[in-house]
Amino acid sequence: MRTSLTSLIIAIGIMALVGILTALEGVKTSVNNAFAGLGANSFTIQNRGSGLNFGRGGHRKVYPAITYEQAQRFKKKFSLPVIMAVNLQVSGTAVAKYGSQKTNPNISVQGSDENYLTTSGYKLAFGRNFSNAELEHGEGVVIIGDEIKKKLFKNEDAINKSMFIGSTKFRVVGVFATKGSSAGFGGDKFCIIPVLKAKQIVATTSPSFTITIMVSSPTALDATIGEATSLFRNVRDLNVTSADNFEIERSDSFQQELSGQLAGITWGGAAIGAVTLIGAAIGLMNIMLVSVTERTREIGLRKSLGATPAIIRKQFLIEAIVICLIGGILGIILGMAVGNLIAVQVSGSFITPWLWLFSAILLCTGIGLISGFYPAKKASRLDPVEALRYE
């Protein structure tokens, strides 16, 4: 019973360790999938930082808004061979309606131009992109996400149907291919309208536009960022001594920062499991010491029949390691089950963190060696005559 309870304590520690790390691997997979479309060869000019500052009050720099005129002037003057999209976030809590059907107030509405598909990594499942005339005149056309299409139009063809976003009427010209819940954390609950139309309906009086630039090769990224910074300083009428009043975010910087935050959480989860395992190791050592005391006559009998101290040590060390491995295997199975309940929901895939699984097995073996060494040494030093007389 004592041995079973000790194995269970070790199993709980390993379950906490493997479960947390498996779940975090799922989160990392989700993050990587979300940013895979952008790749490492694009960047965005905006008037504020990313704001991904967990534990630091969420503080981020905010500069004067980037106007529509500034964004368009920059787009016309930038001469390097890049793909550029001008974007404007309109709302993240819009309601989309078609007939008697309507969505929850969680639809993201963004204005953009003909290059949104390329710079965002999305593809069209049905329909077409915006035409030059629609962009130039800011017409009421929209490309909707797959989830909106399923919610509003069911099995109908959504193309050329009229729908409402808020109180504004739009005609559907395209439907995005699904990317799932990992895509930018918003899934497929979003829609894109012409950027000029977005400027007309946005609620704020001085909206700030963003400019996303994609280069042909990652090797040209740094040089392109330098050229874009220089030109945008001119667009913003900054003199030589003035600091930049805008931010440039590389497409991989948010991913790297989030990965860094997840790494900290990973180590925190590992620490939680380690504390539990330390307690289990102490409990195991206590069990082994009790076992030595209870089996003193057995040890004396074995020594009298020729068992050497090395054989006695090996016996108790193997027992300690086996107890740890039984608990470890049980903990790995439970940890994989618990961790993947979360990982499958987040990333949609079953995660097997092989590195952490092998680490858990090695950790269990190490705990068994450390916890069993002193009791085994004590057992090997018993005098056979005194041990046989022990009651």
Image (cartoon, rainbow, N blue to C red):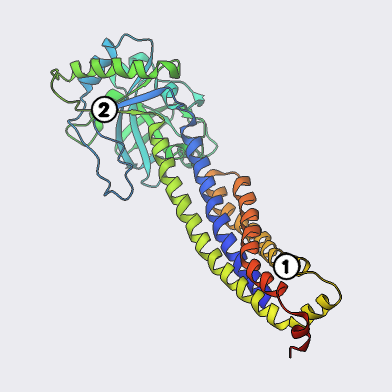
Q: Nearer the viewer, residue 155 or 289?
A: 289
- Which x, y percent locates residue 148? 45, 38
| Residue occupying the far bottom of the picture | 391
Q: Amino acid at mark 2?
A: Phe
Q: Judge whether residue 10 can be spotted in this image.
A: yes
Q: Nearer the viewer, residue 272 or 111?
A: 272
Residue ID for mark 2: 209
Residue ID for mark 1: 313
- Which x, y percent locates residue 155? 55, 37
Q: Answer with left or right where residue 239 lies relative to residue 29.
A: left
Residue 247 in the image: above or below residue 296: above
Q: Nearer the viewer, residue 98 or 255?
A: 255
Q: Please identify the quarter of the rendering in which residue 322 is found.
A: bottom right
Q: Secondary structure at mark 2?
A: loop
Q: Answer with left or right where residue 15 lies relative to residue 103.
A: right
- Which x, y percent locates residue 81? 38, 10
For marks 1 and 2, the one nearer the N-term is: 2
Q: Secondary structure at mark 1?
A: helix
Residue 389 in the image: above or below residue 259: below
Q: Mark 2: few, some, or many residues within 10 Å (few <14, many ≥20)? A: many
